[in-house]
């Protein structure tokens, strides 16, 4: 499925031979003389439609409108959130229509509305078919976003289209069954992405991982027949002098808990435990389209967590890449064990920021549910940038604390640190564990345990937080781009900001 952006009046849109048309109406909608306006105006007058958010009306073979199906939907004040909800509902209503070509008219469009319409359409029309014998429901091929001035929205459109592709890529990978989406497969997908978009890519196997000294990562991987992989992806779009952003994704392709085995109900959902890895690959998929002038490095430690005669046992002590020894008291707290070695590995890139993304704790699901991802950071500027990106992308997160007292439970009598604290504040103690390995750069951790997938009847991956990450990286690229003609005052302000930022991160260290 692909998107295009077009300048089209409602008059022209009405005569376009698409299979279905969605008209998004704001409260300030001013009807023209065209057939679509007439339809909307009559429906509003008759009280059958309100431009209020969430109200929807469907029409069939309407006079003067070429599309057989028309959905009129209210978007209230036309904020990004309202447009997203409106388009999501309308496209959802058309899911079973088998439409190949869809037109979405945004007469009151602004940049955020265009972005929201693209992401909502992609989200609502996604259908998983990879392992179905009959691939039904994937009829939609082309979506046209019709606005009054396409040139004005070109940048917003391009970025949101790329993000939509990235989100779809992440969903597709995370939805795949664990016997297919193996660590080996993730490595192959990374290589394929690299080939298609010109990234640098290195995929390491068990021998290389052991040689690096990643004793903690190896401990998790050794109970499985599937060989582990450590994936390094690089998009080097910025100058060599620019410190890269490093994204680290948890890639547990199946989390049985290991010897500290999980209960049977819903254990299948632990195939989604590579959601962090999928989000890093999805973000690179988007970078491939956008090609921002930014250096971004993706690191993915990936393996299975399985019980076996060779598995790591509760009480085992391992030496991490950092040199710190870890007492593994619970083999189900495996995410932090593979991430800590990747966080140490990240130091070699002298990063400007490191963001890890992980389906890390059930406790985070209890704390924040499925609405916001947990955000932990040692750097206020980085935290703020991620919060802002999340709001803009409608992919929300919420900052959580990192007080040192939360680390008390991680003390061990036999090693430098234990891999679990008590039950209380479980999302925070997990973050405190990671923080020990992320002291050399500004760091943020996104716990996506509640947001990476949905359970129940709508079981499936969400692709979060690809939207947030793409938005954050684009903001970074914009900030890094030299101003076209910097004035003296401009330069002075910029220097002041840089100094402030560097003292802040120095303190965080
Ligand atoms: N992958 C899980 C976290 C998880 C659990 C995500 C449920 C989404 C839903 C992680 O590896 C895990 O098992 N964490 C344990 C940690 C505990 C043993 C300290 C948990 O949250 O129970
Ligand atoms: Mn686990
Ligand atoms: Zn896990």
Image (cartoon, grey):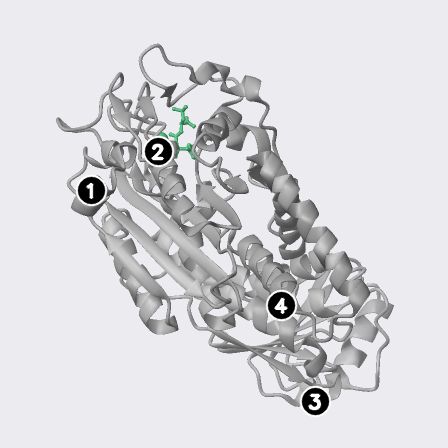
Q: Position of residue 270 (x, y in %)?
A: 35, 38
Residue 322, disc: 2
Q: CA distance from mark 2 to mark 1?
A: 14 Å
Label 2 vs 4, first from the N-terminus: 2
Q: Residue at x 16, y 45 (%)?
A: 207
Q: CA distance from mark 3 to mark 1?
A: 64 Å
Label 4 vs 3, first from the N-terminus: 3
361 up-or-down from 210: above or below: above
Label 3 vs 1, first from the N-terminus: 3
Tag 3 near tag 1, CB within 8 Å: no
Assign a secondary structure to mark 2.
Answer: loop
Q: List the single residue furthest toward the top.
A: 413
Q: Label 4 CB, ligand 1: below 8 Å?
A: no
Q: How many callouts does the rendering have?
A: 4
Residue 310, disc: none
Q: Residue at x 76, y 59 (%)?
A: 492
Answer yes or no: is residue 340 visible: yes
Tag 1 near tag 4, CB within 8 Å: no
Answer yes or no: is residue 98 visible: no
Label 1 vs 4, first from the N-terminus: 1
Label 3 crowd (10 A; few <14 / some 14-19 / many >=20): some
Q: Is residue 160 left or right of residue 492?
A: left
Discs 2/3, front: 2
Label 2 crowd (10 A; few <14 / some 14-19 / many >=20): some
Q: Which residue occupies the foreground of this view, 105 or 226?
A: 226
Residue 12, disc: 3
Discs 3/1, front: 1
Q: CA distance from mark 4 to mark 3?
A: 39 Å
Q: Which residue occupies the foreground of this view, 505 or 334?
A: 505
Q: Position of residue 414 (x, y in %)?
A: 31, 12
Q: Which residue position is annotated with label 4?
A: 481
């Amino acid at each position: 499925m692909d998107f295009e952006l077009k300048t089209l009046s409602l008059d022209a849109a009405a005569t376009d031979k698409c299979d279905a048309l969605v008209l998004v109406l704001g409260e300030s909608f001013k009807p023209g003389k065209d057939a679509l306006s007439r339809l909307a105006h009559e429906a509003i007058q008759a009280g059958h439609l309100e431009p209020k958010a969430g109200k929807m009306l469907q029409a069939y073979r309407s006079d003067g409108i070429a599309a057989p199906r028309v959905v009129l939907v209210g978007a209230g004040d036309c904020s990004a959130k309202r447009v997203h909800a409106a388009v999501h509902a309308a496209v959802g209503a058309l899911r079973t229509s088998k439409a190949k070509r869809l037109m979405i008219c945004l007469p009151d469009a602004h940049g955020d509305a265009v972005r929201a319409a693209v992401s909502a359409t992609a989200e609502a029309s996604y259908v998983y078919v990879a392992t179905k014998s009959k691939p039904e429901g994937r009829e939609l091929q082309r979506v046209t976003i019709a606005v009054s001035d396409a040139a004005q929205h070109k940048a917003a459109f391009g970025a949101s289209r790329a993000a939509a592709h990235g989100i779809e890529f992440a969903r597709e990978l995370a939805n795949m069954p664990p016997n297919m989406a193996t660590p080996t497969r993730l490595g192959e997908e990374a290589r394929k992405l690299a080939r298609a978009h010109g990234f640098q890519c290195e995929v390491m196997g068990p021998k290389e991982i052991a040689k690096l000294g990643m004793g903690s990562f190896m401990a998790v991987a050794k109970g499985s027949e599937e060989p582990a992989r450590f994936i390094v992806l690089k998009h080097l779009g910025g100058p060599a002098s620019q410190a890269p952003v490093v994204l680290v994704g948890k890639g547990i392709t199946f989390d049985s808990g290991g010897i500290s085995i999980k209960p049977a109900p819903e254990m299948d959902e632990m195939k989604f435990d590579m959601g962090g890895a999928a989000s890093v690959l999805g973000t690179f998929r988007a970078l491939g389209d956008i090609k921002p002038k930014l250096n971004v490095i993706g690191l993915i430690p990936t393996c299975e967590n399985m019980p076996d005669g060779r598995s790591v046992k509760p009480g085992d002590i391992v030496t991490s890449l950092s040199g710190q020894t870890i007492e593994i008291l619970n083999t189900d707290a495996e995410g932090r064990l593979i991430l800590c070695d990747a966080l140490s590995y990240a130091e070699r890139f002298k990063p400007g920021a490191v963001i890890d993304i992980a389906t890390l704790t059930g406790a985070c699901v209890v704390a924040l549910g499925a609405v916001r991802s947990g955000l932990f950071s040692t750097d206020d500027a980085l935290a703020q940038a991620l919060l802002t990106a999340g709001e803009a992308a409608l992919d929300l997160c919420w900052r959580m604390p990192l007080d040192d007292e939360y680390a008390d439970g991680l003390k061990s009598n036999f090693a430098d640190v234990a891999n679990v604290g008590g039950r209380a504040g479980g999302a925070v103690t997990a973050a405190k564990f990671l923080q020990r390995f992320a002291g050399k750069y500004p760091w943020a951790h996104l716990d996506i345990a509640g947001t990476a997938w949905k359970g129940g009847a709508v079981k499936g991956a969400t692709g979060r937080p690809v939207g947030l990450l793409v938005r954050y990286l684009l903001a970074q690229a914009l900030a890094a781009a030299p101003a076209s003609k910097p004035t003296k005052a401009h330069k002075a302000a910029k220097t002041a900001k840089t100094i402030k930022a560097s003292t802040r991160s120095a303190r965080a260290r």
